[in-house]
């Protein structure tokens, strides 16, 4: 299935809800074949049911796989399964992430800190490695970071550190794999299950610092991800797109 007329194939993590779900739905509407993954099997199934498949070649279907991105073997198996199913991977969006409730760094637990790093840093690293090894020149990858990657944020130190690391991975990978465009998108507060906790950092305290004093809809982030993955961004790599309502202005 590697002929040039075959639709582009994209892998997406964190697809069970929020930005991941919005990205999967948007890209299928644009004609992509999607291979979606998440550890939330119920949410993943809901996303899968919502995907458009009217324009797919006869006999071709989207793919949904339950994985834990902190397990490199599961990540590798998912990428290999996607390759076996479609013959190639043209694009990837690494969106899976976690955010715990607010806590001072001096009170942080080892378990919470390491879980944050495992999902937000190791998970992205495992996906990047597998995707780069599976892709040919001309492909594209987007890693989702956060506004927390661009300044210190009290009460979410582990999360902020993990998203700083995502930017480092993105820029380093872009230099190591010049034939593949690798970029990051940094959302501001978005209406997703991860940030809809009502806490002071991700609640009104964050949106009040923005030029646009409202939350983003997941589709607004997904549209920027889709642009970065598309040929319209053919001269863009190693970059970070802020989608934060002016929070970092």
Image: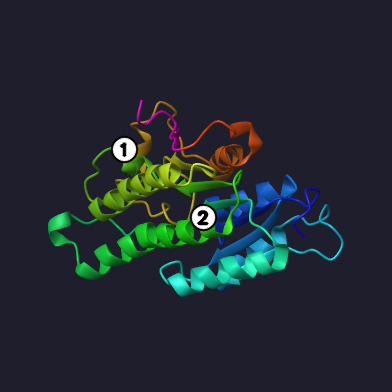
Mark 1 highlights which residue?
Answer: 150
104 and 147: which is toward the camera: 147
Main SS class of the magenta portion in the image = loop
**In magenta segment, residue 239:** yes
Tell me the quadrant of the picture where the C terminus can be found.
top left
Residue 17's x, y, as percent?
55, 58
Q: Is residue 247 left or right of residue 157?
A: right
Query: Colour scheme in the image?
Result: rainbow
Q: Is residue 113 left or right of residue 2?
A: left
- In the picture shown, does residue 139 fall above or below 108? above
Q: Give the residue drawn at x 44%, y 38%.
A: 238
Magenta residues (range): 238-249
**Lower sequence index among marks 2 and 1:** 2
Residue 188: name its quadrant.
top left
Q: Is residue 212 visible?
A: yes
Residue 84: name its quadrant.
bottom right
Residue mark closest to the camera, 2 vs 1: 2
Q: Secondary structure at mark 2?
A: helix
Residue 248's x, y, as percent?
35, 30
Say the numbered circle drawn on residue 8.
Answer: none
Mark 2 highlights which residue?
Answer: 132
6 and 58: which is toward the camera: 6
Q: Give the residue drawn at x 43%, y 53%.
A: 196
**In magenta segment, residue 176:** no
Residue 21's x, y, as percent?
59, 55
4 and 54: which is toward the camera: 4
Mark 2: few, some, or many residues within 10 Å (few <14, many ≥20)? many
Q: Is residue 73 left or right of residue 148?
A: right
């Amino acid at each position: 299935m590697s002929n040039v007329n075959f639709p582009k194939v994209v892998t997406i993590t964190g697809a069970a809800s929020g930005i991941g779900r919005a990205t999967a739905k948007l890209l299928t509407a644009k004609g992509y074949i999607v291979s979606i993954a998440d550890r939330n099997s119920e949410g993943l199934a809901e996303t899968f049911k919502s995907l458009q498949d009217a324009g797919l070649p006869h006999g071709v279907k989207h793919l949904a796989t339950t994985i834990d991105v902190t397990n490199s073997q599961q990540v590798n198996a998912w990428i290999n399964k996607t390759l076996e199913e479609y013959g190639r991977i043209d694009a990837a969006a690494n969106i899976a992430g976690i955010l715990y409730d607010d806590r001072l760094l001096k009170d942080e637990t080892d378990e919470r800190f390491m879980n944050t790093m495992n999902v937000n840093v190791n998970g992205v690293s495992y996906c990047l490695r597998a995707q780069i090894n599976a892709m040919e020149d001309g492909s594209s990858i987007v890693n989702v970071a956060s506004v927390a990657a661009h300044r210190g944020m009290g009460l979410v130190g582990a999360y902020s550190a993990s998203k700083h690391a995502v930017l480092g991975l993105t820029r380093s990978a872009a230099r190591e794999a010049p034939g593949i465009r690798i970029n990051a998108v940094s959302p501001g507060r978005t209406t997703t299950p991860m940030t809809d906790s009502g806490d002071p950092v991700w609640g009104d305290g964050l949106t009040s610092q923005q030029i646009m004093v409202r939350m983003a809809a997941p589709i607004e982030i997904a549209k920027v991800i889709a642009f970065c993955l598309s040929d319209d961004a053919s001269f863009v790599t190693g970059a970070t797109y802020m989608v934060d309502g002016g929070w970092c202005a």
